[in-house]
Amino acid sequence: MNDYDRDEAEIEASRAPLLDHLVELRKRLIVCVAAVIAGFALCFAFADPIYQFLLHPFKMAAQIYAASKEGHGGGAGPFDLLFVLTGIKEAPAASGDLRLMFTAPLEFFFTKLKLAGFGAVVLTFPILAWQVYAFVAPGLYKRERHAFLPFLFAAPLLFLLGAALVYFIILPFVLWFSLSQQIMGAGVAVELLPKVSDYLTLVTTLLLAFGLCFQLPVVLTLLGLAGIVNSAMLMKGWRYAVFGVVVVAAIVTPPDPISQLLLATPIVGLYFVSIGCVKLIELRRKKADEAPGTDIVAT
C-alpha cells in the first residue's frame, strides 16, 4: 500500500456522521470559550500591572524627551533615541511622574475591560489554535497534518517578535515624536496628556499591525504548500513586494521615516525568508515525486 492509499484509508476511517461532527465542534467551542473566560478573568484581575507594563515605552520616551529639553545629554534627535533604546547610550534618569487622564467616570474601567479582552485572546491563542487544528486534522492527509503543524508554533512566535519590536522600539519612537510636538513657553502650553483609552487603542493597534505583518512568512509558505505561489513568482515580483511593504509601513506607522524604516526592513527580510521556505517546499516535493515506488499527492 502506497502513501496515497494509506492516507485515503486513514481519512475513510475517520469519517463520522454529521451529528458526531457537531458534537465534536461543540466540545471544541466549549474549550475555547472556557479558555477565553479564564484568560479574561486573569487579565482583568491584573489589569493595573498590565497597563503599567504597557506604559513603560511612554515612560522611556518621556524621560529621553525631558532629558533632551533639559540639556542632560539624553538625546535630541531620533537617532539618539535609537541609541538609547538599543543600549548604545545609557537611558537618562526619570524626572517627574508620567501623567495620563480619563474624562468619563467609567472610562478607565471600560479601558481595563478592553485590555482584559485583548489580553485574553493573546494569552489563550495557543489553546484556540490547537482546538481549531484538532477539529480539522482528521480531515487532512497525514502529510498535510505534518506540514501544517509547524505553523501553529511559527505564527505565535512571529507575532511575539512583531510585538517586541513595537514595545521596545516603535512605541518609544511614536511617543517621543508626539512629545516633540508640544509647545511650551511664551505664555502658551500645548501639552500632551493622552487619555487612558486612547493610549490603549494606540498600543493594541500597533501590536496587531506589526504582529499581523510578521505573519508574512506563514502566509506565503502556506500559499506555496497549496501550489498557489512558487519561489520563481515571488522572486520575480520582489520589487512590487518591497513597494507594497513600504506603503503598508507608511500607513501603520507615524509620519517619521525612522519608524517606517524599522517596520519595512524586517518585513522585506521576512519576504525573502519566505521565498527560501517556498523553495525548500518545492525541492522536497520534487524529491518525493522522483522517489521510486511512491504516489504522492501535492500539498
Image (cartoon, grey):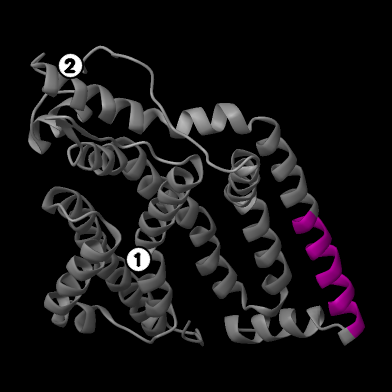
Q: Can you tell which mark lies on residue 107? A: none
- Nearer the observer: mark 2 or 1; the answer is 2
Give the camera-side residue of 236 and 29: 29
Left or right: residue 166 versus residue 147 is left
Find disc 2 in the rendering and name its residue: 90
Q: Going 86% across and 82% down the picture, which residue do you hit?
A: 16
Give the camera-side residue of 269 and 16: 269
Left or right: residue 142 versus residue 288 is right
Can residue 17 be seen from the camera position used here? no
Disc 1 element:
helix
Q: CA distance from mark 2 to mark 1?
A: 34 Å
Disc 2 and disc 1 in contact, CB within 8 angstroms = no
Q: Quadrant of the N terminus?
A: bottom right
Find disc 1 in the rendering and name its residue: 216
In this rendering, the answer to whether 208 lies above or below 79 is below
> Where residue 11 appears, x then y in whole percent?
73, 82
Q: Going 14% across and 82% down the picture, which residue do you hit?
A: 236
Q: Residues within 10 Å of mark 2 (few under 14, many from 20)?
A: few
The stretch in magenta equals 19-33
Q: Going 37% across and 46% down the picture, which residue do you hit?
A: 161
Q: Amino acid at mark 1?
A: Leu
